[in-house]
Amino acid sequence: MKRFERIAVIGVGILGASVGWNLSRHGAKVVFIDAGQSGEGVTNWSFSWVNASNKTVRKSYFDLNVAGMAAHRELAEAIGPDSWWYPSGHLRWADDPAVEAKFLKTAELLAAWDYRVEVHTGAEVRRRLEPALTMPGDVPVLFYPDEAWVHGRHLVGRLVGQAVASGAELRSGIAVCDIGTHADGSIRTVALSDGCRLDVDIVVNAAGPSASQVAGLVARHLPMRREPGVVTRIDCAQVPVHRVLHAPHLEIRPDGDASMVLHSREVDALIDTGEEPAQLARLLHESARHVVPELGNSRIAQTRVAERPIPADGFPSVGAVPSVPGYYEAVSHSGITLGPVIGRLLASEILTGRRDEMLADFRPERFPS
């Protein structure tokens, strides 16, 4: 196993925390660097749904997400599940026949890939799983029992806390403004906004929506999509549902004992029309009251429009960039699902030099420098 002077992990969301935690537990000297506070960026404003049922566009991507789900279960055993891990399953139904047919076809494909899925009626779901929901009694509802949701900020805090206890450094509220290289192009230093310059051997770019700017510091072109999303948290006296829901026109999940998270792709489409975030939040809140009438007395607590960290082709960019020795990327949408598995695989690659075949389709070199 290789030994390094210091490894800088830039960005301390779920991906950066997972990579750094895995490096630290194998004895590497890690410094976490985040322009904000760890876990409070896009990780805290993700829908945080752990799944592979929505990842069928490419079999290798589906397989990576299934591995991500398994890695979450292993991580819950390793560090304890309390406050961050909620493996309660996921429900999906539609109010449009064409959308319903598409969902059912996807469920058939997933079953053929040995992914657990059950089909219930709305009446069965209300009787057995979620009595607070409003839905037609005869509507088909897909139930994915192995899926989960994660409290991302709590998980990041747990991983970073354990890494720091093992000797890692955490530098929050400090941006990386330059990355220095040796004559051969390999990583030498990172310069920080507080005036410090750190000697490092390795840089891991896990900077989420800012990953393209960090890549530019080593003359690396990392094309990213612009895809903003709005997430609203609502407060309620008691959370009336227990699992992730994809209702018609709305995604909803618990976020603790007295809070819920709301999201909708349809509402996301209004972001660029000039609608204020407060109005987008009201649209989400109104949809939630239709799906779960008990939320009639809930109130909007927080709303954020956040950029999703999505490479241009929609797939992760994970691994070494051969043109810049010592520079690695860990950039992906679905970071909540993929964080633990990408953290493990990338840490192993950094420490041993071995490239895992599971990441073969997601290597950074597919984007020319």
Image: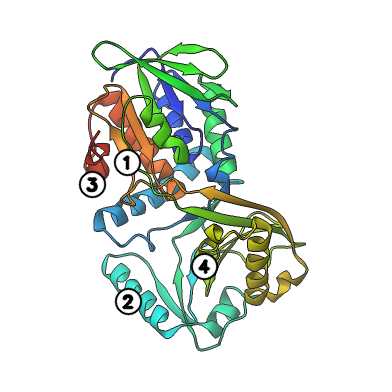
Earlier sequence position, callout 3 versus callout 4: 4
**Distance from label 3 to label 2 (Cα)?**
25 Å
- Which of the two discs, 1 and 2, sits closer to the camera? 1
**Distance from label 3 to label 4 (Cα)?**
30 Å
Figure check: 56 above or below 369? below
Figure check: 219 above or below 266? above
* Residue 361, disc: 3
**Residue type (three-letter) at the residue carrying disc 4:** Glu
Residue matched to label 1: 317
Which type of secondary structure does the marked residue at label 4 adopt?
A: helix
**Distance from label 1 to label 4 (Cα)?**
27 Å
- Which of the two discs, 3 and 4, sits closer to the camera? 4
Whole-percent x, y for residue 2 in the image: 29, 18
Q: Residue at x 42, y 33 (%)?
A: 213
Earlier sequence position, callout 1 versus callout 3: 1
Q: Are marks 4 and 2 in contact (CB under 8 Å)?
A: no
Model colouring: rainbow
Whole-percent x, y for residue 71 in the image: 40, 45
- Which of the two discs, 4 and 2, sits closer to the camera? 4
Using the rendered image of the protein, determine whether residue 22 is visible from the camera's viewpoint: no
* Residue 266, disc: 4
Whole-percent x, y for residue 208 in the image: 45, 39
Which type of secondary structure does the marked residue at label 1 adopt?
A: strand
Q: Residue at x 69, y 63 (%)?
A: 239
**Distance from label 4 to label 2 (Cα)?**
22 Å
**Distance from label 1 to label 3 (Cα)?**
9 Å
**Residue type (three-letter) at the residue carrying disc 3:** Asp
Residue matched to label 2: 105
**Residue type (three-letter) at the residue carrying disc 2:** Lys
Earlier sequence position, callout 1 versus callout 2: 2
Left or right placement of residue 326 versus residue 118 in this view: left
